[in-house]
Image (cartoon, helix red, strand yellow):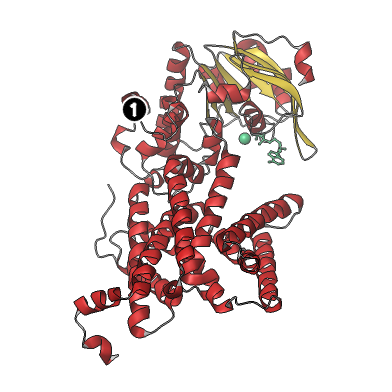
Amino acid sequence: MDLLLSFSPFDFLVEPLSYEFMRRALIVSALVGGVCGLLSCYLTLKGWALMGDAVSHSVMPGVVIAYALGLPFSLGAFVFGVGSVALIGFVKQKSRIKEDTVIGLVFTGFFAFGLVLVSKIKSNIDLMHILFGSPLGISNSDVSQTLIISFIVVSLLILFRKDLMLYCFDATHARSIGINTGLLHYLLLSILSLAAVVGLQTVGIILVVAMLITPGATAYLFTDRFDRMTFLAVLFSAISSILGVYFSFWLDIETGGSIVLVQTLMFLIAFLFAPKYGILKTKHNIST
Amino acid sequence: MNSSFDHNVNESLSIDAYQVCVDYHGTVALYDASLKLASGSICGLVGMNGAGKTTLFNALMGFVRPSRGVIRINGKSVSEAQRDQIVAYVPQSDGIDSSFPISVWDVVMMGRYGGMNFLRIPRESDRKAVLHALERVNLLDFIHRPIGTLSGGQRKRAFLARAIAQRASVLLLDEPFSGIDVRTEKLMSELFIQFRNEGRTILVSTHDLSHVREFCDLVVLINKTVLAYGETSEVFTSENLSLTFGGMQPDPISGSAAPEEYF
Ligand SMILES: Nc1ncnc2c1ncn2[C@@H]1O[C@H](COP(=O)(O)OP(=O)(O)O)[C@@H](O)[C@H]1O
Ligand SMILES: [Mg+2]
């Protein structure tokens, strides 16, 4: 695009800010990116990527029903997110089917139900918005829902930071010192459902899982310290969201896809060039 | 639990298990296991693979619910004992993800979480306890190393340090001697003797009789149930040992077997 080349970086960053919808999209996307980035550390370390995918797809019917009934969409999404998790746990416990199979089975069922509902409930629900997000067209009430949920998620993650880390690292030890690990399990799953709800605002149901795992995976390649990993994941994720929105504006490309693509590129850079764990690392330091 | 009616709880005992039965989905792993350990002793838990050693630990830690029987630790229920940091447990294999981004210091600090406030913010006393524990297992040089970069023996010591940092009066160790070199083995057995002298109670499982001979005051022989328990010299009879090992001779090469010595 020669349009891009003729701009200074200053124009690139500042001009879109003159639009109300762009300011809103940037703030919401950065916030959602940071929140999902923080959670992504726990999910990648716990090995819950598939669970993230499951929950985010399962919220589909909840969103549709909430719209149809005129309720806040986040409420419907949360109910179905938690419902899918409960159902996965139940089927796994009561049958001999392996967990990843149960997860795949349940979330595709929920997702299919959502699709059927959309086609049947003739309303002004835009399927594309649910599936792919629309941060540029986000409404005021959606902004306030996102703010509230983000606040809840971040508060819970900060309050239970150490306990959740211990739970992800060594649940047996957590139990042996009298910590209720069952509670932590459901806490993390509830946080996951909430984060999926805010994530689908910006990138939509199909790509939410990227927000929930990619930043954590990227940060993981840079450090051996959990604290630094969370810091980097939040940073990478927020930057990806902001850049993604800008690219979407200037290149006139789909916003959710743009954000996730920036995240993926950042991961690729880390994968190649991260100082210690990148595959092209130059220093072969002999460990002492 | 109705069986507690016919069993008087003795508060001076560190571990008091009475007729404990555990089954996994109907398959009995342990039945009528009874055991009384006074505080300030080292007790070896001896049995072959599958005898139910780990199962007994799981019951003592409340990880499995006994289908029958009573367990008291320092006169308290298992969950109370855990809540009060009376009991520390080092599992057979730590089962952790070795690429988890966490340092040895942070792992040992996790031993202190139970006594900390809700946000788990370490106080000075916690830092001291962690430092002290790392010193005792000789890992001070490895404080800042990611846990996954330690060797098997060093890792075992790190998890032992975590249990030490808990400052618990009852220590449960499931096969701590498997897969470690002679030096670490010596360090551990000396530590156990020190703990005993500090008045703590140690229950340590092994399938190697030489450890029992070296430093255990008491021994429990199990094979699906407690076959015998008491002073090491009294319990090690050829009859008991053949019951324990199902008529099989324990490995003569390790020097651990030779039950003839105890005739
Ligand atoms: N989670 C489990 N589910 C079903 N059976 C189990 C489980 N854990 C142990 N067992 C069975 O219980 C018995 C005792 O096992 P365990 O306590 O691990 O023995 P040990 O530690 O002495 O080698 C074995 O027969 C084992 O197969
Ligand atoms: Mg075992």
| In the image: residue A26, left or right of residue B209 | left
Nearer the observer, A29 or B19: A29
Which percent across, then down, holds residue A178? Answer: 55, 30
Nearer to us in this view, B240 or B43: B43
Above-or-below relation of A272 to A177: below
Quadrant field for ligand 1: top right
Residue B68, picture quadrant: top right
Q: Which residue is drawn at 68% across and 10% down?
A: B9
Closer-to-camera residue (A196/B243): A196
Residue type at numbered disc 1: Arg
Specify the quadrant that holds the N terminus of chain A: bottom left
Left or right of B64? Residue A184 is: left
Residue B263 visible in this rendered orientation of the protein: no
Q: Quadrant of residue B174?
A: top right
In the rendered image, residue A224, in percent from the top left (x then y), is placed at 35, 50
Q: Name the residue under label 1.
A: B123
User: Residue B225, image x and y in percent?
Assistant: 74, 25
Chain of the residue that carries numbered disc 1 in the rendered image:
B
Residue at 23%, 87% (x, y): give it. Answer: A5
Q: Where is residue A34 in the image (x, y as percent from the top left)?
A: 38, 59
In the displayed structure, would residue B7 be above or below residue A185?
above
Of helix, strand and loop, which one carries label 1?
loop
Closest to the observer, B50 or B170: B170
Q: How many marks?
A: 1
